[in-house]
Amino acid sequence: MNNNVALVYPYFLTDARDRQLFQPLGIALLGSCLKRLGLDAQQFDCTFEDIWRITATISDFNPSIIGIYVMATLASNALRILGLLRSMLPNSIFVAGGPLPTLYPGEFAKHFDVVFTGEADIGFPRFCRDYVRCGYGRNNYAKKMNMSAYPGIFLSNDHGEVSVPMAWNRERDLPDIPLPDREGGAYKKYQDDWLGTWGHRPATIMTSYGCPFHCDFCSKPVFGNRFRKKSVQAIMTEIADIRRLGYDSLRISDDCFTLDLDHTRKICSGLLESDMDMKWSCLSRVDAMDYRTVRLMKNAGCEKVYLGLESGSDRTLALMNKRATVRDGVEAVNTFREAGVKVAGFFMVGYPGETMREVKKTFKFALGSGLDEISFTVPYPLPGSPLYDRVRSKHPDSDWKFENEMKFFYESELDVATLKQMIDETVRSFEQAKVRSYATDLEEKQGKRTLSPAGHR
Ligand code: B12
């Protein structure tokens, strides 16, 4: 049995115009952990590939183990790749991991030999090492290996029934986690795609894991509610590695970068002391953002912040269990803008229980609060979210099946087509207002508009 492990990210590029693609960090991290244990781990990111070429390339690599990442939108692709590779590689074992197998290990175990739930960097690399080292083969490993040694492992087939609870990395374990192997993935293609579309080259980075909030629409099966932060030193080392690969900016992908403001400030100071000159963006909470911290973020390179403002109605925010008010949102937008940080607001309309009056308040809020960018969705009940559980129990016949990619079922008391039309109109008004304001600025710069002596128009 050889040492080869294939790690597959089963997303294929669509022709979405405003796409923002990021290198998958999960398989990059697992790749690094596997290499550290002496395995030949290769990443097969389907983003810039077609299904035939990538399956042929994987088959040519002849891996003993093939691991496939699956999240809400990727199940059908994952199953298709699994089906193709199974016939080409009858002696390999297939492992599923990621958010969706974490939620539904039993479903995935019907198709895959093994499932890993949760933070799989804890158990999966050791399982791979022991599997190839012991050499029992795909028909005997389940009986002969000591499965309790691999947190998060799940299997249910002719070879055995195993379910070991998943484990979480503790904060004190985080320094031992290696840097993700970005170099082993298609990082250059991502950089080229970004450069061609948006003019810069951002990398994602996670500086913390987990989020203690319980927003009704959110699903966080892998990292859960336990907030754990990486050390400032580890974060700086990772950013230096990202810089080395030619990235020029960061999209900090933490569930929320400002959960522990003291830590946020320390990271900012670390960035200021380094000579890396990285620009970055992040998601932030809306409550408790003080000007001093936000100004420090700006000085440390923060160009844009994404705020989950969600609604212009406090009652809807309560339905979403957001634990923040519209007023918190307004204050956060003002604080960030005063400090010179651009603000993008996320909104949701048509929440179950919401009225049209409240929806209209949200549109008004989005247009009137001085945001630099806005984005709207209707709520998609994500598997793993409380919203999903609630809606599913109301509509048992329209249950989500993991083969229907992107077709999250959605039934609102409000008409979805009308909501989508209102979203389009609001976004158009927002864009027109932006164009008008840029035109005015330009005229002022060119001296076509003059200020009255008192300084008023
Ligand atoms: C960055 C990000 C994106 C980026 C890039 C995605 C990418 N290339 O990775 C963009 C912006 C493109 C994106 C898009 C979307 N995303 Co997103 N994204 C994230 C985010 C913030 C970070 C992902 C990350 O890098 N994590 C760090 C790595 C280390 O963690 P990981 O990937 O989970 O890997 C660990 C385990 O999952 C496991 N594992 C991973 N791969 C494998 C493989 C094997 C074989 C095994 C055994 C284990 C395993 O081990 C890893 C190490 O412990 C997560 C939230 C989060 N906190 O993770 C959401 C998240 C993954 N996204 C989510 C969603 C819903 C989406 C969208 C559907 C949003 C939308 N409505 O459009 C789209 C779908 C895109 C698609 N590809 O189809 C959800 C998934 C929920 C679910 N139940 O499946 C999450 C959890 C956010 C949330 N709370 O809602 N996303």
Image (cartoon, rainbow, N blue to C red):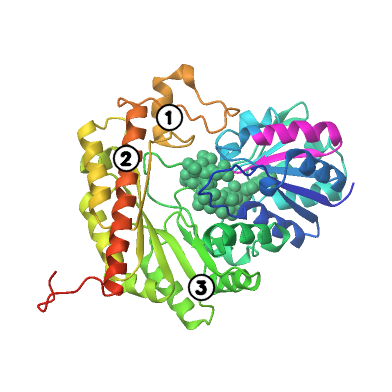
What residue is drawn where x is 21% and y is 43%?
314
- SS type, badge 2: helix
For label 2, the crowd category at 10 Å Cα-Cα, with few meaning under 14, some 14 to 19 and many 20 or more, is: few
> Which structural element holds mark 1?
helix
Q: CA distance from mark 3 to mark 2?
A: 36 Å
Taking the magenta stretch, the answer to whether it contains residue 89 is yes
The answer to whether the beta carbon of the residue marked 1 is less than 8 Å from any atom of ligand 1 is: no
For the point 26% across and 39% down, which residue is it? 316
Mark toward the start of the polypeptide (2 vs 1): 1
Q: State the mark number for residue 457.
A: none
Disc 3 crowd, CA 10 A, few/some/many (<14, 14-19, 20+): many
Number of residues whose C-alpha sits closer than 10 Å to that of mark 1, classed few (under 14), some (14–19) or many (20 or more): some
Extreme-right residue of the structure: 1
> Do labels 1 and 3 touch, CB within 8 Å?
no
Q: Tell me if 16 is positioned left or right of 131 in this view.
A: left
Which callout, 1 or 3, points at the residue further toward the start of the chain? Answer: 3
| Whether residue 327 can be seen here | yes
The amino acid beneath tag 2 is Glu
Name the residue tied to disc 3.
278
The magenta segment is 77-98
Q: Which residue is mark 1?
A: 389
Task: Residue 441: give x, y in percent of width and height.
Answer: 29, 67
Q: CA distance from mark 2 to mark 1?
A: 32 Å
The residue where tag 2 is placed is: 425
Q: Are marks 2 and 1 in contact (CB under 8 Å)?
A: no
